[in-house]
Image (cartoon, grey):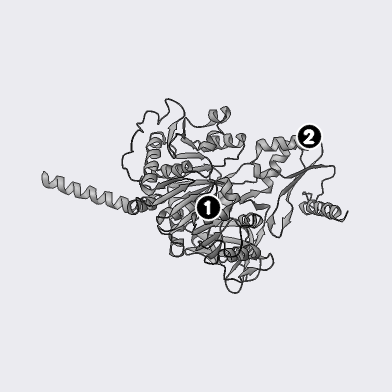
């Protein structure tokens, strides 16, 4: 009997060890770093500094509160850059849930629609998110809402009797490792703009994010002496990159508050930031604030730009300010998991001369890129077409949108792939270049926006069928603003604007809104966006001449 028991225990121990080795949980890397560097700083926000051990305890505390409530597994997180959002991300994954960051600036109607679509098991809010909990949102939210307590990164249920309310969360949580999940476990859902008027939820599994981190590790390895900046909002997948790359290597992640973003150069110098990732438009803001003097950012050793075209002027300004930094331009839709093409800036290029921007480069390991024509056939080098990406790290598609998933996600060369909708070409050196969108999707202030989504809401707000949204003004390929037009009727522009604020995030509400008697149409009867831009340009030129 004793021999049998000993054999059984050895077998169970073997199974447990195998499960730990095969655990695809995205926070396993963080847990390993916390074991190796327990007393090193993991998270810095203002004057608050949390060690890896302290941050792990916060994650375990959130996990203990979530586990009794998990059914579907999806946990919504409503907040901005904060300790609470970081703890929510780690705690959700630690519990074996699916992290669903929601835009803090989404209007109530959109949040309520997302709650109905997602059927969340729980909602976690930081202090900014707590201010958004209107009676309407609370009625649509799941039964368990975790709200911040006085101690940073800790939460309590908003309502008595919720699934976690009976859990004893006093004192230090028990030391429990991350939940064991497989490669197909849904790690997170990121929502991007959609043409129908509702955003699309991109589903990324544990395998995809794991393969991405493995691919970039050889040349993006961070260590315990590194200090990374969190420049991105929670509902931008670059924020997940920032968290996981920093915490995989024992680095400290420094959260940038809104005022820090205004004075980003000062923040970099004050915290001796060593690694930086942001959208390129931040460079223009820093230049305007006078923060890009030559040699002014000496602590930086690695810089990534992603999410928007990187102009040659911007990269030259950054290179002069950060002479010790390697600079990489990255490209990749959320659907293919963060980023998949990279181009190192060598001081002169490579440059996409048609647009005055840095080339998007070549695929990372495990990824293939192809340029195809309208029939889906590969085209020769130098010929423009649609950029198609294929990789095992491709996402699972769009949440509850099977038809759109089937349309955009295909198999290419035996790998799962994605039709990006981006126009580009490959040069004879094998370098890829980005020429813009095939449709009306743009990048504005770091956000991916479908102009058709604004149009859909504008029809509703203006009670008009003929509407058109354009990017204006433009500085090269950088979008300076949004302008929208609708065929004049009974609704005044200010009333339309007020309605749009209830239907769209603030960054999607057009700066210029105008009712016009005659909407320009193309030969096929569609709204002629080029004519609308020309009209704005002509007015601008007339004002300048007067």
* Secondary element type, mark 2: loop
Report the residue at 82% width, 39% height from top.
488
Report the residue at 71% width, 35% height from top.
498
Q: Between disc 1 and disc 2, whose residue precedes?
A: 1
Q: CA distance from mark 1 to mark 2?
A: 39 Å
Q: Does the image show residue 333?
A: no
- Figure check: 262 above or below 305: above
- The residue lying toward the viewer, choosing from 516 and 543, is 543
Report the residue at 41% width, 59% height from top.
223
Outermost residue, top side = 160
Which residue lies under the disc numbered 2?
491
Which residue lies under the disc numbered 1?
238
Left or right of 320, for residue 100? left
Report the residue at 49% width, 61% height from top.
414
Badge 2: residue crowd in 10 Å (few <14, some 14–19, many ≥20): few
Locate residue 160, reporting x and y percent. 43, 25
Query: Do the numbered discs 1 and 2 sit on residues whose CB atoms are within 8 Å?
Result: no
């Amino acid at each position: 009997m004793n021999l049998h028991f000993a054999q059984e225990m050895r077998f169970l121990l073997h199974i447990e060890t195998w499960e730990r080795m095969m655990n695809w949980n995205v926070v396993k890397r963080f847990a390993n770093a916390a074991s190796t560097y327990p007393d090193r700083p993991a998270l810095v926000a203002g004057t608050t500094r949390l060690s890896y051990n302290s941050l792990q305890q916060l994650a375990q505390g959130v996990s203990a509160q979530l586990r009794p409530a998990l059914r579907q597994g999806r946990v919504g997180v409503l907040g901005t850059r904060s300790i609470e959002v970081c703890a929510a991300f780690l705690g959700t994954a630690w519990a074996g849930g699916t992290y669903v960051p929601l835009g803090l600036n989404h209007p109530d109607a959109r949040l309520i629609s997302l709650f109905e679509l997602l059927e969340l098991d729980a909602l976690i809010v930081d202090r900014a998110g707590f201010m958004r909990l209107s009676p309407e949102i609370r009625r649509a939210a799941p039964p368990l809402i975790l709200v911040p307590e006085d101690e940073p990164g800790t939460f309590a249920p908003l309502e008595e009797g919720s699934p976690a309310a009976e859990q004893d969360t006093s004192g230090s949580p028990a030391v429990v490792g991350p939940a064991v999940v497989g490669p197909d476990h849904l790690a997170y859902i990121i929502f991007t703009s959609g043409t129908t008027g509702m955003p699309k939820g991109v589903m990324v599994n544990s395998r995809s994010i794991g393969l991405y981190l493995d691919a970039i590790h050889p040349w993006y390895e961070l260590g315990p002496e590194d200090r990374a900046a969190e420049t991105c909002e929670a509902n931008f997948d670059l924020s997940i990159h920032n968290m996981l790359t920093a915490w995989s290597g024992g680095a400290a992640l420094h959260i940038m508050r809104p005022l820090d973003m205004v004075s980003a150069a000062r923040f970099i110098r004050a915290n001796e930031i060593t690694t930086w990732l942001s959208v390129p438009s931040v460079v223009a803001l820093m230049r305007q604030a006078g923060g890009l003097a030559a040699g002014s950012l000496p602590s930086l050793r690695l810089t990534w730009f992603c999410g928007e075209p990187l102009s040659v002027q911007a990269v030259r300004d950054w290179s002069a300010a950060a002479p010790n930094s390697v600079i990489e331009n990255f490209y990749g839709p959320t659907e293919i998991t963060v980023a998949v093409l990279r181009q190192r800036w060598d001081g002169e290029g490579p440059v996409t001369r048609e647009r005055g921007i840095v080339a998007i480069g070549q695929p990372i390991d495990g990824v293939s890129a192809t340029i195809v024509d309208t029939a889906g056939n590969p085209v020769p080098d130098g010929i423009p077409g649609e950029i198609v990406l294929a990789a095992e790290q491709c996402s699972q598609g769009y949440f509850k949108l099977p038809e759109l998933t089937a349309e955009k996600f295909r198999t290419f060369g035996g790998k799962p792939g994605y039709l990006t909708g981006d126009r580009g070409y490959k040069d004879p050196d094998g370098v890829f270049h980005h020429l813009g969108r095939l449709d009306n999707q743009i990048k504005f202030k770091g956000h991916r926006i479908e102009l058709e989504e604004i149009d859909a809401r504008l029809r509703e707000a203006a009670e008009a069928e003929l509407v058109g949204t354009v990017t204006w003004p433009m500085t090269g390929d950088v979008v300076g603003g949004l302008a929208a037009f609708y065929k004049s009727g009974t609704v005044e522009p200010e009333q339309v604007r007020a309605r749009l604020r209830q239907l769209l995030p603030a960054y999607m509400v057009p700066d210029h809104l105008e009712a016009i008697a005659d909407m320009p149409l193309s030969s096929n009867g569609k709204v002629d966006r080029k004519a609308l831009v020309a009209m704005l340009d002509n007015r601008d030129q007339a004002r300048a001449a007067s």
